[in-house]
Image (spheres, grey):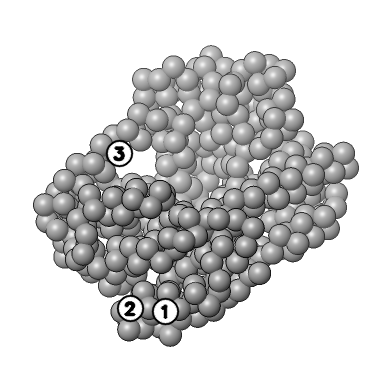
Amino acid sequence: MSYRQTLTNGVRVVGEEISAVRSVSLGIWVYTGSRNETVRSNGISHFLEHMLFKGTQRYSARELAEVFDGIGGQVNAFTSKEYTCFYAKVLDQHFAIAAETLAEMLLRSSFAPEEIEKEKNVVIEEIRMYEDTPDELVMDVLASQVYGSHPLGYTILGLEENLRSFSRQDLGSYVKQRYVPQNVVISIAGNVPVAEVLEKLEEQFGARVFPARTADPQVVAPQFIVGSSVKVKETEQVHLCLATPGLAAGDSRLYALVLLNNALGSSSSSRLFQEIREERGMAYSVFSFHSSYRDCGMFGVYAATSPEHVTDTLDLVRKICEDVAVNGLTEAEIRKGKEQVKGSMMLSLESTSSRMSRLGKNELMLGREVSLDESIQGIEQVNVEDVKRVAAAILERPMSLAAVGPVAGLNLDV
């Protein structure tokens, strides 16, 4: 049974009661990420995510870890460009402990100066580790190229010089601006009765302890910039990304784009994978991807190949994309894609964690629940012409290029 309620302060609660399991997954979703930062504050959303684990008015950082270890639970968090999520999975009998502890972290973190300084070093090491991971680094190079100075072009981890400058006051100000009830969605999936969920969440996250405040103004949409950007790095392969504007979250054409992406490069039977890896042996990793934000999107292709194969790989990617843009997909590709996508959706919902994530993201990004039946119906209704129209609208546009690796002297014209 699914439900949607609002606490007294405006915090939205979405959940699914599942009596057949013995676990419960709880997520606190905050509509804030690197997109809500400035050049000077870039990285503060992610740093704050770390700091909420570093002690509260009630618990030390070690004690927070011991709470979840002591009940056999799991707790973690992540930051994206548009939202931050803190989540836990525990036995259903420990739901109250998980809710109380996450509320303590979200609403009463102490931001002790000594913990701030220690955690700066941890995140700086994370940034340096990321710099040594070229397949992830190229995605940041791509975002910077296509979104320029817009915050969607910022890295999620931020810059080392920014991290070193953050103060306790900076963290407090950011929390006051962005961690407000209207920006928060709590999602729950598992074996806890609805009445118990709502009573506990009102006690821990309601108006009495989390007063309503005005949020910052909404963000503005970016302009997609066509061009190329490279980062010279001593790696064995050149990591490449080609990208073009995609679709925003909630766009009715997303179902067609999902099937297009599946056939073009997101499955092992896709055109890019079969042609570039299986037939030519020019890459181990090659795939297409799509990122949707509230008001825009990006469709792209990633490939990693040896320097001597860069030109041929880029030519093949462009050739395959151009063919799909002009001719679309076959009926057989669409039928196969529908079964793959439906199977993936259904299998992913066999865990309470996946169900919690689906509920939370849909409410935060779309403002409503998107049921599995609705998604399957949307996929089933897509036809050949729908995909052809989406392919033409996206793949006929000029593409931007990003590359990381030993690229000096290579021909990387857009």
Q: Earlier in the sequence, mark 2 or mark 1?
A: 1
Label 3: how many Cα within 10 Å (few below 14, some 14–19, many 20+): few
For label 3, the residue is: 126
Residue type at mark 3?
Glu
- Tag of residue 202: 1
Q: Which residue is denoted by mark 2 in the rendering? A: 210
Q: Which numbered disc covers residue 67? A: none
Where does residue 205 sit, x and y in percent of width and height?
A: 38, 75
SS at circle 3: helix
CA gap, disc 3 to disc 1? 36 Å
Q: Quick check: marks 2 and 3 in contact, CB under 8 Å?
A: no
* Total residue callouts: 3
Q: For the residues marked 2 and 3, what is the alpha-carbon distance in whole angstroms?
A: 32 Å
- Relative to 50, is 406 above or below? above
Q: Quadrant of the C terminus?
A: top right
Residue 367 appearing in the image = no
Residue 102, image quadrant: bottom left
In the rendered view, tell whether residue 173 sits above or below residue 44. Answer: below
Mark 2: secondary structure: loop
- Looking at this view, name the residue that lies furthest to the front: 93
